[in-house]
Image: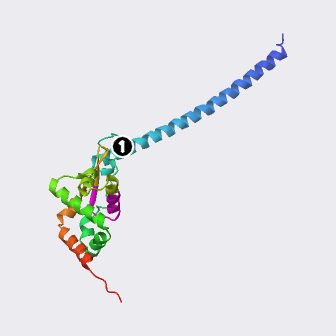
């Protein structure tokens, strides 16, 4: 007895579908293997990068040091105004240009910071400077920002990502240039101009 042609056709279609599924599974298997290889390569790269970061941290690179108040957040250091202070302030023209460019209030604030820090031997807050000069804290902030922009030797430190303390750069102090700066400012203030 010959099988029913409809059954034969149904088995033939099932056989085709199974072959198609088998081919699809083989393609998926290849894609999964390829993805696994890529994942393993990425894991190796991550491991290498992690070891490089750990090496940098152990070398005490300041960029990689964690902030004290927020573990996991990189501390950003701003050393633009203090880089090579000795070289910057050893040149008379550059020294004059920095301190001559300061306004009277900026220069007064710088002198107050210098003098108060010498007296209490500790960095100062905006509040302490504002109280000493009887001006607002926001005025002190503005003047300090302008002093730093003009490359005055001021260091600004944040404590616990909140309180700001200010000090005159230690290298600048060690150069003992305050008398020279006062002479420059005094000479400028006493200078007269001729008019025709």
Residue 41 falls left or right of residue 18: left
Q: Position of residue 178 (x, y in %)?
A: 19, 67
> Split into 4 quadrants, where in the image is the N terminus?
top right
> Split into 4 quadrants, where in the image is the C terminus?
bottom left
Numbered disc 1: secondary structure: loop
Residue 195 falls left or right of residue 24: left
Please name the colour scheme applied to the rendered image: rainbow
Residue 14 falls left or right of residue 137: right
Q: What count of labels does the image hold? A: 1
Q: Position of residue 121 (x, y in %)?
A: 16, 54
Q: Is residue 69 above or below residue 175?
A: above
Residue 15 falls left or right of residue 30: right
Point 77% across, 22% down: residue: 12
Residue 177 seen anywhere in this rendered image of the structure: no
Q: Give the quadrant of residue 50.
A: top left
Q: Which residues are magenta?
A: 142-155
Q: Position of residue 52 (x, y in %)?
A: 35, 47
Q: Position of residue 93 (x, y in %)?
A: 28, 75
> Residue 143 colored magenta?
yes
Depth order, front residue of 96/171: 96
Depth order, front residue of 127/19: 127
Depth order, front residue of 31/136: 136
Q: Which residue is mark 1?
A: 73
Residue 189 seen anywhere in this rendered image of the structure: yes
> Residue 48 colored magenta?
no
Crowding at dot 1, Cα within 10 Å, few <14 / some 14-19 / many 20+, comes out as: few
Point 67% across, 27% down: residue: 21
Q: Is residue 43 above or below residue 150?
A: above
Q: Give the quadrant of residue 187.
A: bottom left
The furthest residue to the front? 134
Q: Is residue 89 above or below residue 161?
A: below
Q: Is residue 55 above or below residue 115?
A: above
């Amino acid at each position: 007895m010959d099988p029913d042609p409809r059954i034969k056709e149904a088995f033939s279609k099932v056989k085709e579908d199974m072959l198609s599924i088998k081919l699809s599974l083989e393609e998926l298997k290849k894609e999964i293997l390829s993805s696994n290889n890529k994942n393993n390569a990425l894991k190796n790269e991550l491991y290498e990068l992690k070891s490089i970061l750990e090496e940098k941290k152990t070398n005490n690179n300041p960029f990689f040091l964690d902030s004290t108040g927020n573990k996991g957040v990189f501390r950003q250091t701003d050393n633009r105004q203090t880089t090579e202070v000795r070289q910057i302030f050893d040149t008379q023209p550059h020294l004059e240009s920095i301190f001559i460019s300061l306004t009277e209030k900026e220069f007064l604030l710088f002198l107050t910071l210098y003098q108060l820090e010498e007296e209490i031997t500790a960095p100062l807050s905006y509040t302490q400077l504002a109280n000493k000069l009887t001006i607002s804290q926001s005025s002190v902030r503005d003047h300090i920002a302008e002093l730093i922009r003009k490359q005055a030797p001021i260091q600004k430190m944040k404590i616990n990502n909140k309180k700001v303390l200010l000090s005159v750069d230690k290298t600048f102090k060690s150069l003992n240039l305050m008398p020279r700066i006062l002479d420059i400012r005094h000479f400028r203030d006493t200078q007269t101009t001729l008019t025709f």
